[in-house]
Image (cartoon, grey):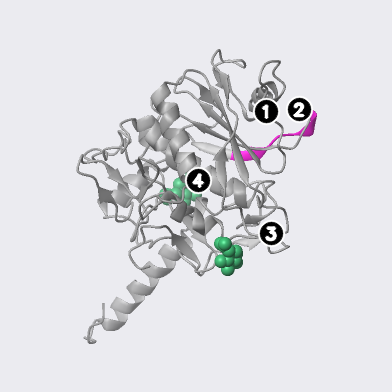
Amino acid sequence: MLRGCTRRCPAFLAVTVVIILLSLREVIGWRPWPHNRTNAAHDLEFGGSKKYEGSSEFVHLKYHMGPVLTADITVHTIWYGVWERNQKKIIREFINSISAVNSKHPSVSGWWKTVQLYTDQTGANISRTVHLGAEKNDRFYSHGKSLTRLSMQSVIKSAVTAKTKPLPLNPQGGLYLLLTSSDVRVQDFCGQVCGFHYFTFPSIVGYTLPYAWVGNSAKMCPGVCAYPFAVPDYIPGLKPLKSPNGDIGVDGMVSVIAHEIAELATNPLVNAWYAGQDPSFPVEIADLCEGIYGTGGGGSYTGQLFNGADGATFNMNGIRRRFLVQWVWSHVVNYCTGPNALDQ
Ligand SMILES: *[C@@H]1O[C@H](CO)[C@@H](O)[C@H](O)[C@H]1NC(C)=O
Ligand SMILES: *[C@@H]1O[C@H](CO)[C@@H](O)[C@H](O)[C@H]1NC(C)=O
């Protein structure tokens, strides 16, 4: 906005500067966490934060010399608990969409191009190829209906050491994706996390395998982890968006799965690409853009999205389906970006 100066100009400028500074300071993505309820309500009431697709000056995303996933990535899914066929199909088709060659623009494979910009110290880029590998069903809750970060490693151990059809061990390009059904409690789930990634310990599993966990939040906290397809009840009047594949929990998981796969690829052993001083709380390429799905996104505002003829909201195309997937940080341009960006 460029206007001639009136007498009130200096004050106006000062306010503007303060607003810009405040908005730049806050770079971590947005989700309606329960402990942020006051902020969330305030944020919505005042029309969303002034954040604009992340921000550049104060983000110091750095490479810490560790490996990234440069070999073809194979996703080994462990379906923990009870999963319907259609739920599995949505998630499989999303993963297959990551390196699909002929999806309509804007596409999931276009989204992955930002992840491919990251390299290791030899200059090798993250692999273009992400495909589905062998899967394991853990239908009978081998480690109960309440998992911790440590017991999760035992679930993975059971899957790679099973007597029948064990998951292959693939420490080079293997990505172990543990998905828990909506009746499984997980440490910090709903309160602080919707998913996370880490690596297994040789003392528990026998190998160092990068893995990610994502939970189906449909029963426990859809307003948090499947936002914006569900909204938290502490924000009255806010309407949920219609999800593109008819399953709120799973459509919400897709973006979290994308978040974790992007971070795992760029920071598999938590010593490669992250911002912040503390490696136990790394701020990674998807953390910086959580809640941002389109141009103008920031705070509780998702950014510009598309609406299908069926009224469902999405921002990218995959194989036979549409998905809503959060953007990721590009260290080349220093902001969050995605294939549906309007300024490309
Ligand atoms: C959420 O709450 C944490 C503290 O619990 C705070 O550091 C953070 O800034 C809050 N984020 C938002 C977006 O309100
Ligand atoms: C590999 O990374 C470099 C540095 O970010 C980038 O310039 C190049 O375009 C990337 N290559 C691919 C295939 O993405």
Q: In the image, what residue occupies the spot 72% across and 39% down?
A: 171
Task: Give how far apart the Cα atoms at labels 4 and 3 are.
Answer: 20 Å
Q: Of the residues under marks 1 and 2, which one precedes in the sequence?
A: 1
User: Percent position (x, y) of residue 168?
Assistant: 69, 30
Q: Of the residues under marks 4 and 3, which one precedes in the sequence?
A: 3
Q: Tag 4, which secondary structure?
A: helix
Task: Give how far apart the Cα atoms at labels 3 and 1 are.
Answer: 27 Å
Task: Give how far apart the Cα atoms at labels 4 and 1 are.
Answer: 20 Å
Q: Are marks 2 and 4 in contact (CB under 8 Å)?
A: no
Q: Of the residues under marks 4 and 1, which one precedes in the sequence?
A: 1
Q: Tag 1, which secondary structure?
A: helix
Q: Is residue 233 above or below residue 80?
A: below
Q: In the image, what residue occupies the spot 31% across and 55% down?
A: 48
Task: Give how far apart the Cα atoms at labels 2 and 4 are.
Answer: 26 Å
Nearest to the observer: residue 168 or residue 148:
168
Q: Which residue is mark 3?
A: 120
Residue 153 marker: 1
Q: Of the residues under marks 2 and 3, which one precedes in the sequence?
A: 3
Q: Is residue 102 above or below residue 33?
A: below
Q: Tag 2, which secondary structure?
A: helix
Is disc 3 surrounded by few (<14), some (14 to 19) or many (20+) residues within 10 Å? many
Is disc 1 surrounded by few (<14), some (14 to 19) or many (20+) residues within 10 Å? many
Q: Are marks 1 and 2 in contact (CB under 8 Å)?
A: yes
Magenta stretch: give its range.
Answer: 197-203
Q: Would you say 48 lies left or right of 204 here?
A: left
Amino acid marked by disc 1: Gln
Amino acid marked by disc 4: His
Q: Which residue is mark 4?
A: 259
Residue 204 marker: 2
